[in-house]
Image (tube, grey):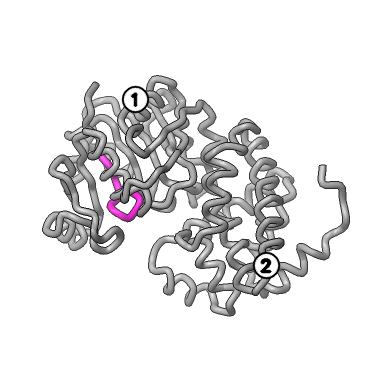
Amino acid sequence: MNKNIALLGAGSWGTALALLAARNGCQVLLWGHNPTHVAALTRDRENKQFLSGLAFPDNLQITGDLAEIAAFSDLLLVCVPSHGFKDILVKIKPYLSRDVKIAWATKGFNPDDGCLLHEVVADVFGTDTPAAILSGPTFAREVAADLPTAITIAANQPEFANQLSDMLHGGRFRTYTSSDVIGVEVGGAVKNVLAIAAGIADGLGFGANTRAALITRGLTEIIRLGVQLGGKPDTFMGLAGLGDLLLTCTDNQSRNRRFGLALGLGKDRAEATAEIGQEIEGVFAARETYLLAQKHGIEMPITEQTYKVLYEGLDPLTAVQNLLGREQKSES
């Protein structure tokens, strides 16, 4: 098996997966879009900006050249934010002279039209292109530091899921395979919205009871939307659903949770964003999730209130009161 893998995106998550693949014996080429950052990675042989103290092995190299990435491997693993996902695929396509396999660890929707990312891959490269998503309860620094982790790899072709699993599974990193690309995508995108909600509640000073209720009812919202879009119910009870939701709602390594905490403490959206200093996928996902729920007539009250806080200036405390004041109903 060809064990060359090209990663697009030299942020914390792209770097962590590059380190993981290199530890597993792959030849890795990591691409970054910022020339200054690429030069620093090449010089320092570590990502001091996002994952300081973790040295690059010899089989992990850096480039800022898309042509070099295209020539290096027919397996591309995309790790850029969702709003840049389609753009990077369109940019690299002219350099590709052979069939490719596209995997991504990006969590979110395409901001142009709200579609899922596998639909973007199909639009750019065709529906027969092997496509896979990696998702689950994973913080980049813990993966990079080789702490025990488990993820789901969902692909449209079983052999591609198995190939990725063979390349990444090993040591303290466990992979499970799935055919439910849609379910894994929805779980990974919507959990970021709910993490913002959980952060807001904690920032307002509410307790563990509130957080548990938000997580539980938030999972119900993920399932409603995911099944409507074609996902399988069982997926949402696994690593890419409940597992990822628990992680991002309860630990302050989550940028989305920290962003929500800042809002709950009275900071505005701009202040909270500046404080985090990295992409906050849940901000974009809140808009796309809300619009999808409206389009399909799906009840997603936590998502709706989070959207209104972010995009309509609703006071966070009022948003919580709106949730509590909803009409009584049966849980089932």
Whether residue 200 is situated above or below residue 220 in the rendered picture: below
Where disc 2 sits, the SS reads loop
Amino acid residing under circle 1: Gln
| Mark positioned earlier in the residue sequence (2 or 1) | 1
The spot of residue 54 in percent (x, y) is: 24, 54
View extreme (bottom): residue: 266
Whether residue 120 is situated above or below residue 270 in the rendered picture: above
Picture mark count: 2
Residue indicated by mark 2: 207
**Relative side of 43 to 1, left or right:** left
Label 2, residues with CA under 10 Å away: few <14, some 14-19, many ≥20? few
**Mark number, residue 202:** none
The spot of residue 20 in percent (x, y) is: 29, 41
Label 1, residues with CA under 10 Å away: few <14, some 14-19, many ≥20? some
Q: Quadrant of residue 211?
A: bottom right
Q: Quadrant of residue 212?
A: bottom right
Whether residue 201 is situated above or below residue 63 in the rendered picture: below
Residue indicated by mark 1: 163
Amino acid residing under circle 2: Gly
Front-lying residue, 168 or 192: 168
**Is 69 included in the stretch rendered in magenta?**
no
Name the residue rendered at 19%, 35% in the picture. 27
Name the residue rendered at 51%, 26% in the picture. 179
Residue 15 visible (yes or no): yes
The spot of residue 14 in percent (x, y) is: 32, 48
User: Which residues are the magenta region?
Assistant: 6-13
Name the residue rendered at 55%, 35% in the picture. 182
